[in-house]
Image: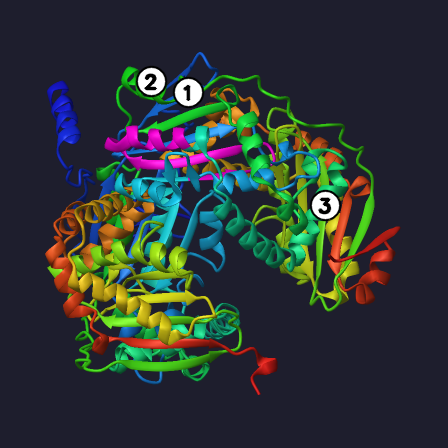
Amino acid sequence: MITRLPPAILAVAASFAQTLDRTKPPETPPLAPYKLPASAESKLPNGLGVVLVEDRRFPLVTLRVAFHAGSRFDPPGRSGVAETVAGLLKAGTPSRTARRIAEELAAIGGSLSAAESPDSLIVSGSVLSENTPKLLDLAADIVRNADFPPGEIALRKQNRIQELAIERSQASTLAAEKLRAVVFGTHPYARSLPTPEAIKAITREDLLKFRETLLTPANATLILVGDIPPRQQTLDLIRARFASWPGKPVPPAPGGEFPKPRRSITLIDRPGSAQADILIGHITVNRRHPDYFPLLVGTNILGGGASSRMFDNIREKQGFAYDASAHNIPYKDAGLLNVNTQVRDQVIGPALEAVFAELGRMGSEPVTARELTDRKNYINGIFVMQLSSQSGVANQLAGLRLNGLPNSYLETYVTRVRSVEPDQIERVASRYFSPSDAAIVIVGDASKIAAAVGKFGKVTIEKAK
Amino acid sequence: MKLTAICAFLLSASLLPAGSVNIPFEKFQLPNGLRVLLSQDNAAPVVAVYVIYGVGARSEEKGRTGFAHLFEHMMFQGSANVPKGVHYREVESNGGFLNGSTHPDYTDYFEVLPSNKLAVALWLESDRMRSLAITKENLDNQKEAVKQERRLSFDNQPYATAIVDVFPTLAYKNWSNSHSIIGSFEDLNAASTADVARFFKTHYAPNNAVLSIAGDIRIPAARKLIEDYFSDIPSQPQPAPPVLTEPAQTETRWQTYKDPLARVPIVVIAYPGPKRRSPDFYALAMLDMILTTGESSRLYLDLVKGRKSLLNIEAGLGWPFGQPSDYKDPGIYGLNLTFNPTFTARQIVAQLEEQIARLRSTPIGADELERARATVRSMRIQSLQSTMTRASLLAQYELLDGKPDLINTELDDYLAVTPARIQAAAAEYLKPTRMSVLEVIPAPKESSK
């Protein structure tokens, strides 16, 4: 049984075994848990929260001022106020024109911008670190004093109405708008894009009132990440610009009851549509809820990227669509599951069946060990890589503050993802993925697809706007 | 330590700071000619692996346009030990991302991964450098994929054909520089597996490549892995580089192109650019900053907000196929101006020339230069935050200049530009007689007859 080999051949074989086996991917060590760089937190007497994180690798500083002040705070009948405030925050203050703000920013190698979401309005900035005081001057001026010059308001409204027309010419926008309306009912999360009429109706007074009520110190956290001056000196810089900002009571976030999930099918008729857009949704949970991590891993197995079940079945096996995916969007008080694909009219029936089958299967049989390991590595890999830049750290810290999460959330994230078990996924899937109480929205040419869609239950047909 | 910190603070408070970022790196070469750059930064668990080959569209031969790009696709089709699909799966299932891209003068590939997966990226890159799977099935498949890419990303997009296929023929007269980088369907069809094998053997040899790794590594361990994975790939004799010289331009070139997909008109403009890394090169880069970059630039303030004639501005040395860091002679200074249709292309070009005349006749002010310097510095340092950018810049500087240290020193060349230099560069390089203009006119199909 023993094959005799000359010593030279044995030596070659031995050295090969010690070096490389190129035939399979190399073994690698596990990912190390994330360590947040040293951070310091404090609060000014007017209520402004302050978070400082030192990172001296590059002579840069990244700023966020995060407010609980998003589109859910739009006054009734005044949708679009939050996004207009964000869009015009740099358009002028009593002491600076838009041009002067742009020139001063360029002179310090800086940038400032603002963006809103349903729950928040976040001012983002960055600067060469030796100019940190100047960036704080400009940030303080715009958040405290932005006065929305009438000429800039008119220009913004005109451009925004054009943009909205282009966005609503896309089937995906129509589907997303309808899904939010069905899933969130009368809760402000149901609103998405403003109508052109709502934009036209916005007045300078609306914008000033929003700023005065919601852009206030106790409603905000100021985050500085990067090559900042020593802590006391940085706090002095912040106090000099923000301590005199008058504190005000923080208004409660408008909310309301979420409707109980129930099965519905809405077909938005878009004559001439080249394909059918399918969007299926369900209310889910926020980031504080114990279901969040199992739901995150489960949604990824279902429809996160090119290795997911939906991609593999709907696209690769069946060839119904170019893409098929699922993701969960967490807001402060709830989440929204989005499951979507775009298919040819002829296969709308079998495609819906295939999507329902994948949704149902998640709640009725355990995921495989290989799926679980791969997806956990994927989620954790993305997480740690996002934290490699100043803006990644600043965004995560802003997200923690806006969602009422502790700093330890970042350091325990990798472990929490890793500890998700198949039975937890099965349980959350039967709770949130079940087609029996899902909201189903389809955008397409009703004359071609209504009959096939009708086989899945009662269909409400609406005209595309 | 303490003393240095205090000194640094005093200096930065009182003097104009010089470019103060230093990216540490080590360079070595394997016996087969592969040049390697390693830059260690253990602050975040991320690693970028970048491989650049000294071959691009300018190396293509007549009858084989689009070949460098077709070949780039072949690099994702598997190799001796990496079955088709595994390259993507190994990177993406770990949360990483990857891509490749074809440029006029080089082709590059990268993986960005959590740092515990460094060996996986080296396994993937070395296996395809050693043993690419060149089969008829893969080639036919990728010909179709490239055609589909052409239909979706070029033929079905406004302005893409004008900029990618037409504009180079106006800006350049030497075929090596002017032919389409994406290529024609005829030439793609004509490519054979023998062409692919020859191209692979010649141009994808280790002595025509640079490998760089930035991020969370330990240099001795990374070096050992590289030696293990890459040392036994044989080097190959290299052909003479293509001749790229351009005839001198002595008069304005103007061409119109009707674009059935465009809704808004644009003018695309080229001026032959200065020699890479000459003082004029940096002067023109700073001029571009003052003229076109950001909401305090001259074109934005005077034409977008003032006269409301421009809607959008893109410009730069090397535009549209590159940026200043990877510009190679002969290159251009390019501008793409999207304009309000109540103006004509001639009016827009006249407005641009007024702005250039101003740059020629009057030195720029100290505050304007200061803004441009701060912007250049900030953009540079911002970009160096990215692990991927550090890896790619090191390798590009090595391949194009043989000077990877430019990653730390080049910012000083930008900051040294004076108002007089900018004025002289405007006069010498931005003359009307050196201008090529492509006017793209929206021509929707239904109304074109």
Are dots 1 and 2 on a single chain? yes
**Gap in Å between the C-alphas at discs 3 and 2?**
45 Å
Q: Tags 3 and 1 in contact by the CB under 8 Å rule?
A: no
Q: Label 1, on which residue?
A: A50
> Chain for mark 2?
A
Q: Is residue A143 left or right of residue A130?
A: right
Q: Tags 1 and 2 in contact by the CB under 8 Å rule?
A: yes
Q: Label 2, on which residue?
A: A235
Q: Residues within 10 Å of mark 1 (few under 14, many from 20)?
A: some
Q: Residues within 10 Å of mark 2 (few under 14, many from 20)?
A: some
What amino acid type is highlighted by mark number 2?
Answer: Leu
Disc on the earlier residue, 3 or 1: 1
Disc on the earlier residue, 3 or 2: 3
Q: Residues within 10 Å of mark 3 (few under 14, many from 20)?
A: many
Name the residue located 28 percent from the left edge and 72 percent from the top edge. B270
**How far from the left and from the top, in percent, is residue B66?**
38, 75
Name the residue located 44 percent from the left edge and 30 percent from the top edge. A145
**Gap in Å between the C-alphas at discs 1 and 2?**
9 Å
Q: Nearer the viewer, mark 3 or mark 1?
A: 1
Visible residue check, residue A9: no
Q: Label 3, on which residue?
A: A179
Q: Is residue B166 left or right of residue A160?
A: left
> Chain for mark 3?
A
Q: Which residues are magenta?
A: A113-141
